[in-house]
Amino acid sequence: MRHVRVRQILCLLPLLLVTVVAVQHRSVLVEGFGQLRAAEWPWLVAAAGATCLTWVAAAFTRQGAVVERLPARRLLATQFAAGAANHLLPTGLGAGAVNLRFLTVCGLPLARSSAALALYLLAESIARLTLLTGLLIAFPDALRIGTLLPAGALGPLLVIIGAVLGAAVLVLVLVRRLRTAILSFLRTAFSEARSVHTRPARALALWGGSLAFPALQAAGLVAVGQALNLPVPPAQMALAYLAATVAVALVPTPGGIGSVEAALIVALVAAGGPVAVATAVVLAYRIITVWIPIIPGALTLGALVRLRVI
């Protein structure tokens, strides 16, 4: 009986979190929906379509990270639910927890499920940086990357990163049990990666989905920019999106809410867009990609918990 009550609470928890987050950002929601009323709707439909395809791309990547065949419909539903969870918890934790639970329910041991999650994150990061690098090479003067960071923040940021890495290395050297656990995990992860890459279909799903995911996200922003007549070329809008998301990757806010908006506005302005129009584009884009899907996503998450899919 206690187990049933806990599961019922977990089913309702996503909706409660959505309500809390929505109340906290109600001014953004009101202004964002106001911007959508003035936009050209065919472009908004294209942005919504690109957003839906990101869940398909994520499902392909998740499947490509494991050798076993996963149930396709449940996998896709899990990615939709994971998107909502990712906007309710610090960046990456929500989606990671949902997918880790899904893989273990599908019968994968925890060690292999964790290795698959790490492989997914690595592939997606490499793909995002690859797309960003390619656009920077193609359009070297399109964006001033330094504008994405506050003045004088680069030096302290590098010092903090160096200190964190140094502390991590020191802990690994001094704590033998932790070092043994991490080495065991790395062996499992490398073994899983080798197994996946011996199967062309899995490798194609992993890397194809990893490239498609950020590309579709950028395409959604481009479509919203076109809908609101942002005077920035589409390739430069995509470059601005990739640069902004990479810049805020280390900011532990739920779904990047707040930090992503600020970085995107700065990036679009740095690419040549007027501040007012860039702000309108970002607000409308986040309404389409975050706030409209978050309620059905939370409902799906609760249903998956209730059905014991996760």
Image (tube, rainbow, N blue to C red):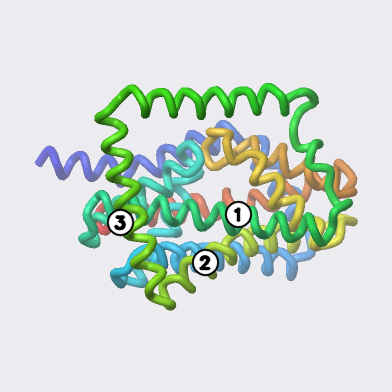
C-alpha span from label 2 to label 3: 21 Å
For badge 2, the amino acid type reads Trp
**Which residue lies under the disc numbered 2?**
207
Q: How would you rate the neighbour count of disc 3 (Cα within 10 Å): few for under 14, some for 14-19, many for 20 or more?
A: many
For the point 62% across and 66% down, the residue is 50
Q: In this view, does 135 lie above or below 179?
A: below
Which amino acid type corresponds to the residue marked 1 in the rendered image?
Thr
Local packing at callout 1 (Cα closer than 10 Å; few below 14, some 14-19, many 20+) is many
Q: Name the residue under label 3.
A: 102
Q: Position of residue 261 (x, y in %)?
A: 69, 41
Q: In this view, does 145 lie above or below 196?
A: above
Q: Residue 118: x percent and y percent?
A: 41, 50
N-term mark: 2 or 3 = 3
- Packing grade of label 2 (10 A; few <14, some 14-19, many >=20) is many
Name the quarter where the C terminus is drawn: bottom left
Quick one: which residue is furthest to the left in this view? 1
